[in-house]
Image: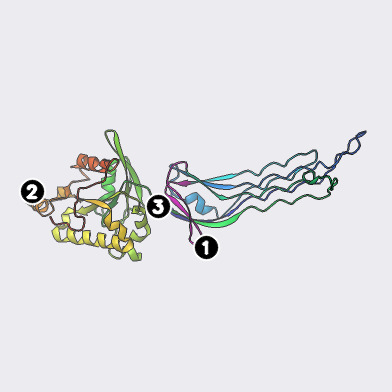
């Protein structure tokens, strides 16, 4: 299924049914009187959060959602049937805003969380409702009220414990495959990851949800590459993992780390305060001397080979530690140097 993280939809609650004007007419029973029933309530539209959908694809295909109208009342005090309600299933982390003003209306973070977007119209009262001592034969009834209408925009922001960051082709997807059962596409070329992927990492009785974000390049906050489109998905992560290509050399590693952090700060300065830790991938491509020099220069980093699953157990332990307590691996996240 195509990954869609934005959608816009018009919602229309059901119209209430009209009340009935009716009088009792039975043989040999005089003074029957008014007996018109009330109209039924119009259907409401509700959003509810679930782990089942992975994107907003189905909602994006549906431009208008209209609930059923309530049925009209009938004689013999019969109330019309209520219009059927509509429940729209959305992924966890969906933010719902007013499409015209941008006001945040709901933020569905927990499984089963619901929000009523449009109430159905109230059904009209039948003429039996208006009988009084001074008006014993009312010959009128209320029309049903219209349901609420609004146009909303939906934005999905993935919920994950850890976000994987790095340049294109640094090995983030390979790492996610190594630590979880997720199977994102991998390849020896840039931008193999075109949408975020979620994976569940298990370490004993601990678990963590990890998000693989498409590669971030310089200018991502301005829309270059794919980073700007998906940077918002790491705003809710509790920690960040920078995955860097160890085979590029010390200077290139430092430059890429600086570019990534700069793009994070330009997108949202709060992201610079998120706990983070560093992984140097593709260490299998280095000889012993190069590897020792790398470890000496970046003592706080973890050297691994995601392709050959070297050092993966330690990464799993670190990832799952976020399930209970925050990561404190990098006391100073603003510098690679000790």
Q: Of tags 1 and 3, which is closer to the observer?
A: 1
Q: Residue at x 60, y 44 (%)?
A: 85
Q: Which residues are magenta?
A: 90-112
Q: Earlier in the sequence, mark 3 or mark 2?
A: 3
- Is residue 168 at least partly visible in the picture? no
Give the farthest residue toward the front.
133
Callout 2 environment at 10 Å: few (<14), some (14 to 19), or many (20+)? few
Helix, strand or loop status at disc 1: loop
User: Where is residue 84 shown, x and y percent of the image?
Assistant: 63, 43
User: Where is residue 289 shown, x and y percent of the image?
Assistant: 6, 51
Q: Please give the label number shown on residue 100.
A: 1
Helix, strand or loop status at disc 3: loop
215 vs 295, nearest the viewer:
295
User: Where is residue 203 shown, x and y percent of the image?
Assistant: 26, 36
Disc 2 target residue: 288
Helix, strand or loop status at disc 2: helix
Q: Earlier in the sequence, mark 1 or mark 2?
A: 1
User: Where is residue 319 shown, x and y percent of the image?
Assistant: 26, 43
Disc 3 target residue: 157
């Amino acid at each position: 299924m195509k990954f869609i993280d934005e959608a816009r939809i018009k919602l229309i609650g059901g119209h209430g049914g009209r009340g009935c004007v009716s009088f009792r007419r039975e043989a040999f029973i005089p003074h029957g009187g008014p007996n018109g029933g009330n109209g039924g309530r119009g259907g409401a539209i509700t959003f509810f959060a679930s782990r089942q959908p992975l994107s907003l694809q189905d909602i994006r295909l549906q431009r208008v959602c209209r609930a059923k109208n309530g049925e009209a009342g009938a004689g013999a005090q019969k109330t019309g049937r209520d219009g059927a309600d509509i429940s729209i299933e959305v992924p966890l982390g969906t933010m719902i805003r007013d499409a015209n003003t941008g006001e945040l209306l709901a933020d569905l973070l927990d499984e089963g969380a619901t929000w009523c977007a449009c109430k159905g119209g109230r059904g009209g009262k039948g003429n039996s409702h208006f009988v009084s001592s001074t008006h014993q034969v009312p010959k009128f009834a209320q029309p049903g009220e219209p349901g609420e209408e609004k146009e909303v925009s939906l934005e999905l922001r993935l919920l994950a414990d850890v976000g994987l960051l790095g340049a294109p082709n640094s090995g983030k997807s390979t790492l996610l495959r190594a630590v979880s059962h997720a199977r994102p596409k991998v390849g020896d070329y840039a931008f193999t990851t075109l949408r975020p992927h979620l994976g569940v990492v298990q370490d004993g009785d601990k678990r963590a949800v990890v998000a693989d974000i498409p590669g971030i390049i310089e200018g991502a906050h301005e829309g270059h590459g794919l980073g700007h489109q998906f940077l918002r998905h790491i705003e809710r992560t509790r920690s960040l993992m920078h995955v860097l290509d160890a085979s590029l050399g010390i200077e290139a590693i430092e430059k890429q780390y600086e570019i990534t952090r700069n793009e994070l700060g330009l997108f949202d300065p709060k992201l610079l305060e998120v706990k983070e830790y560093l992984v140097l991938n593709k260490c299998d491509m280095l000889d012993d001397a190069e590897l020792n020099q790398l470890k000496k220069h970046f003592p706080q980093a973890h050297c691994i080979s995601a392709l050959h699953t070297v050092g993966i157990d330690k990464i799993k332990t670190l990832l799952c530690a976020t399930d209970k307590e925050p990561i404190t691996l990098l006391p100073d996240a603003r510098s690679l140097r000790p």
